[in-house]
Structure formats: C-alpha cells, structure tokens
C-alpha cells in the first residue's frame, strides 16, 4: 500500500514538473513558430503558411522574454511590482558624481538634410580622437575621420559588416550576444562556424587555440563581443595582443564588439578621484580595446563596433560607429546606402558634447563606481538563492547565472523564465546565447539550457524587487519538492 501511495505521489509531483516544462517549452516554440515533433499537431496555422512569400523570423532573447512578461501583465517599465533584469541596456538617468549631460539642441535646415552614410565629419573626428587618446598614445599610426563609420545602432553596424563579407567562413563563440545569430544567418555568402572550447571550464579561448582553429578551419573573419556578453569576461593584455597578431598575420578579419569597454570593475580603485586620485587628464579608469595593439590602422583587419548605446548610456540615440581601415569604411558607406541610409543627423550633432574627452573621463569613473555596487549586490543575492556563478564578471553589466542546482523544473532556463514572468520578473534564458545560425541545433540540447543572463543594467529598484520575487518563486518549488520527500519518509516509517 505504501509503495502504491509513494508511486501516486511521485506521479503527481512529476506531473507538476512536466506540466510546467511543457507549458514553457510550448510557448517558446509557439513564438518561434517551430513545430514540435512529438506534439501530434501543427499548433494552428503559422504566419509562414498564411504568407508563404515570407520566411520565419525568430525573436531575440530580450524580445521573447519581454513578450512572455506582457502575457503575464507587464506593460509599464516603471511598475514597482515588476523587476526587469532582462534589459540589455543601462539605466539612463543621472549618476552620482557624473558630469551633467545637456540634451538640448537647436536644429536648423541643414540638420534635417540626409547625413553622409558614414556619418557627420565632426563626429567621426571626435571618435578618432577618443581612440587615439585612450588607446594609441605614442603610436605612429593614428586614426582619422576616414577610419570611422557612424551607423544607426550596433546591430546596423554588424549588418553592414556582414553585408560586405565575401564568400567566406565567419567564426563565432558560444555563449555570445543573441543578435549574432540573425546577423550570421542573413547573408548567403557567409558560412557560420562555431569555435569549440575543448575545455568547457574556459570562459575565454587561449590565443594558441584560437590560432589553431582559425587557421585549421580556413576562417575568413571572426565575430565576438569583448568584454563578453553574457559572461562579463574580458580578453585583454597579452592575449588580446595575440588575437590582433593572428588577424594581421593570417589576414583574418576580427569584428570586435566593444560596446561595454567602459564597464570594468577590476581596475585600481585607489586611482578613482573619489578616493583621492588626481582629477585630471592623466588619470583614466580602466578601459580595454583591441585598437591598442594594432600596428597600422589602415592595414590590420580589425573592425571595432562601439557607440553611445552602452558606454554613454544613450540607447535611444541609435548613434554608434565602426572603427576600421579606411578602405573598409568606404565599403561600409556603400553598404549603408542600400541597407539603412545612415544615422540620424540631428542626434549625431547632439552627440558631439558627449565625445569631449574630459566628459568621457569623468563619466566613466562615475559609471564604474555605480555599476560595481550593483554587480556586487546581485552576486551576493544570487548566491543566497542557490544560483551559482562560475565566472565573476569583471566587466559589462551581466551575470551568467548557473541554475542547475535549483529544484526541478527551475533548472531549465526556458521554464525559469516562464515561472519568473508569473512572479513579475524578466530575465533572458541562456539558450538564446547559444548562437545557432540557421537553426542547425535543437534548443533542448543546448549547452546553455541551465544558464540565465541577469542584467544589472536597469536601476537598482529592479534588482531588489527581482531578488525578492525570485526568492518567493524558488521557495514555492522547494516546498513542492520537500512535501513529496516528507510524504515518502512518513510512508517508510
């Protein structure tokens, strides 16, 4: 009798887990219009069937997570009951100790004309001066406006770069930024190829392994984020120098997504002006760029993508840039003429004061101070919840959390998001960072299925509410598991 009751209770417990998992995965497939091989039905007429001239367009991770939150009542980002820990953007308000930002602009007739496809010359000159000051002091080869292409957002910049690629193989890493999946699968001339870590405990690939795989596979270009989204790890120093050497010697283009190059937390805090360091042009906070190791800015095949979105905390501007050899910038301008038409002219002009070097220095110190506190808070609270972090982030504003030790079914990132949405939390499942161009791998076999990206980009309120709501969610499933265990123990007495 006890055995029968135990089996019945186990079946009930298992059913709850399976139902939660089925609900979450069904919603994932519905939004991606994939047909499950085991569900016995077509789930209704898909958009592709209604409009056969179109192809399936998948949602990126943040869009999918936000859509699931909306299904559970999310509508207002300022709603105090909701915690947005999925947002891939920083808070945009004033930071303590940061210099003031003026967003007033007088627009005349010339400002509403088309801007050049490569951007306003004044802004391009300031971007070049920024790289020369921070990363190329004392070097003979210096950037000029001819090395800068202004683009309407980072993804637009990556799309332009993909558009000018020839028939080549483009390498990428996992995990990495979710939007790479669409960019790598968009153009037929590109053959995507994932770099495989032989040691899965590595956050970053050694230069020796990178060179072995690059040369051995005949890679023509590589796309990667540095510092890395979602792990918060940084390729720097001798290792980054070797990556640039490999690109130069083997004529391999490296597209360096350096959007988080101001978000470093392992610099020397004693140099911070708030801690007594000199508040002058000789004292800059830690920042890393591949441009430091380029020999000739017009020869080495390094293409850097950056912009106002993250480091300057102005995501709504959609003003970003690519820094590259001048001949590549010319090609990027041609691609922009048919892809996006160029960045907004008035906002490029509004960006000019933000590119003043003294403003950048002071703002970067305040940014690192502020976001380091949020990182430290979230790391501590996630550990208390049983969410482990293999790689403590030294940069970005993301934490790559391992949920494998949470009670089932929360150890599946797709289920984790669905349950989070029910508890008014937004986060991004790890499977979206398992970059999968053209859908060649199945999501349920993803190596990132037990990871979640938590963002501490949004304001602190989101983190405190999110931790509180997550605790309630995890406690609920812990009690569910404990109730079964207690029942079985009683039966065995």
Image (tube, rainbow, N blue to C red):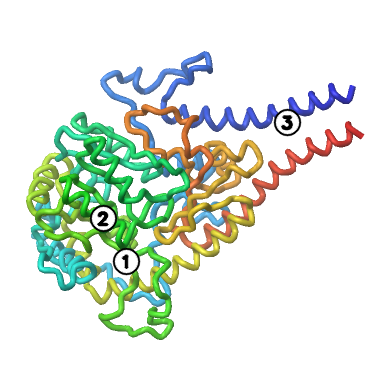
**Which quarter of the rendering shows the C terminus?**
top right
Residue 298 versus residue 129: which sits nearer the camera? 298
* Picture disc at residue 242: 2
Residue position marked by numbered label 3 in the rendering: 13
* Picture disc at residue 159: none
Residue 192 in picture, x, y percent from top left = 28, 34
Residue 450 to residue 347: above or below: above
Q: Residues within 10 Å of mark 2 (few under 14, many from 20)?
A: some
Quadrant in the picture for residue 352: bottom left
Residue position marked by numbered label 1 in the rendering: 287
- Of circles 1 and 3, the one toward us is 1
- Of circles 1 and 2, the one toward us is 2
Residue 492 in picture, x, y percent from top left = 89, 32
Q: Earlier in the sequence, mark 1 or mark 3?
A: 3
Q: Name the residue located 68 percent from the left edge and 30 percent from the top edge.
A: 16
Q: Secondary structure at mark 3?
A: helix
Q: Position of 458 compared to 378: left or right?
A: left
Asked if labels 2 and 1 touch by Cβ distance under 8 angstroms, the answer is no
User: How far is mark 1 from mark 2, CA to CA?
Assistant: 18 Å
Q: Secondary structure at mark 1?
A: loop
Q: Residues within 10 Å of mark 3 (few under 14, many from 20)?
A: some
User: How far is mark 1 from mark 3, CA to CA?
Assistant: 50 Å
Residue 82 in picture, x, y percent from top left = 54, 52
Residue 272 in picture, x, y percent from top left = 39, 79
Asked if labels 3 and 1 touch by Cβ distance under 8 angstroms, the answer is no
Q: Name the residue located 28 percent from the left edge and 83 percent from the top edge.
A: 280
Residue 396 to residue 452: above or below: below
Q: Name the residue located 42 percent from the left edge and 50 percent from the top edge.
A: 203
Quadrant in the picture for residue 49: top left
* Residue 227 appears in the picture as rendered: yes
Q: Earlier in the sequence, mark 1 or mark 2?
A: 2
């Amino acid at each position: 009798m006890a055995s029968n009751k135990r089996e019945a209770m186990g079946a009930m417990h298992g059913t709850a887990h399976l139902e939660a998992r089925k609900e979450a995965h069904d919603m994932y497939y519905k939004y991606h219009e994939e047909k499950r091989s085991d569900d016995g039905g077509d789930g209704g007429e898909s958009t592709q069937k209604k409009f056969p001239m179109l192809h399936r367009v998948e949602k990126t991770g943040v869009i999918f997570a936000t859509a699931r939150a909306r299904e559970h009542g999310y509508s207002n980002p300022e709603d105090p009951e909701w915690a947005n820990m999925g947002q891939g953007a920083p808070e945009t308000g004033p930071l303590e100790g940061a210099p003031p930002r003026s967003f007033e602009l007088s627009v005349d007739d010339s400002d509403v004309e088309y801007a050049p496809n490569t951007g306003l010359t004044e802004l391009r000159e300031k971007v070049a001066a920024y790289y020369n000051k921070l990363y190329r002091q004392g070097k003979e080869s210096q950037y000029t406006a001819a090395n800068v292409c202004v683009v309407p957002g980072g993804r637009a910049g990556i799309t332009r770069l993909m558009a000018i690629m020839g028939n080549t193989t483009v390498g990428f890493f996992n995990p990495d930024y979710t939007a790479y999946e669409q960019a790598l699968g968009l153009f037929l001339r590109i053959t995507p190829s994932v770099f495989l870590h032989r040691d899965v405990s590595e956050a970053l690939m050694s230069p020796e392994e990178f060179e072995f795989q690059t040369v051995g596979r005949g890679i023509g270009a590589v796309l990667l984020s540095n510092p890395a989204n979602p792990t918060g790890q940084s390729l720097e120093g001798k290792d980054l120098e070797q990556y640039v050497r490999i690109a130069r010697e083997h004529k391999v283009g490296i597209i360096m997504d350096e959007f988080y190059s101001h978000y470093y937390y392992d610099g020397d805090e004693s140099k911070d002006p708030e801690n007594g360091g000199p508040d002058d042009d000789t004292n800059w906070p830690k920042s890393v760029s591949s441009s430091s190791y380029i020999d000739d800015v017009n020869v080495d095949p390094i293409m850097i993508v950056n912009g106002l979105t993250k480091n300057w905390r102005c995501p709504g501007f959609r003003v970003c840039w690519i820094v590259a050899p001048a001949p590549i910038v010319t090609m990027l301008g041609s691609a922009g003429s048919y892809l996006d038409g160029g960045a907004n002219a008035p906002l490029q002009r509004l960006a000019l004061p933000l590119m003043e070097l003294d403003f950048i220095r002071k703002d970067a110190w305040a940014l690192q101070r502020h976001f380091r506190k949020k990182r430290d808070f979230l790391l501590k609270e996630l550990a208390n919840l049983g969410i482990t972090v293999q790689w403590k982030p030294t940069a970005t504003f993301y934490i790559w959390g391992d949920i494998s030790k949470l009670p089932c079914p929360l150890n599946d990132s797709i289920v984790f998001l669905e349950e989070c949405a029910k508890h008014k939390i937004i986060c991004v499942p790890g499977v979206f960072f398992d970059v999968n161009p053209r859908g060649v791998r199945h999501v349920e076999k993803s190596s990132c299925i037990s990871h979640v990206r938590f963002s501490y980009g949004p304001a602190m309120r989101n983190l405190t509410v999110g931790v509180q709501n997550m605790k309630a969610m995890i406690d609920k499933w812990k009690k569910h598991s404990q109730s079964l265990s207690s029942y079985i123990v009683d039966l065995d007495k």
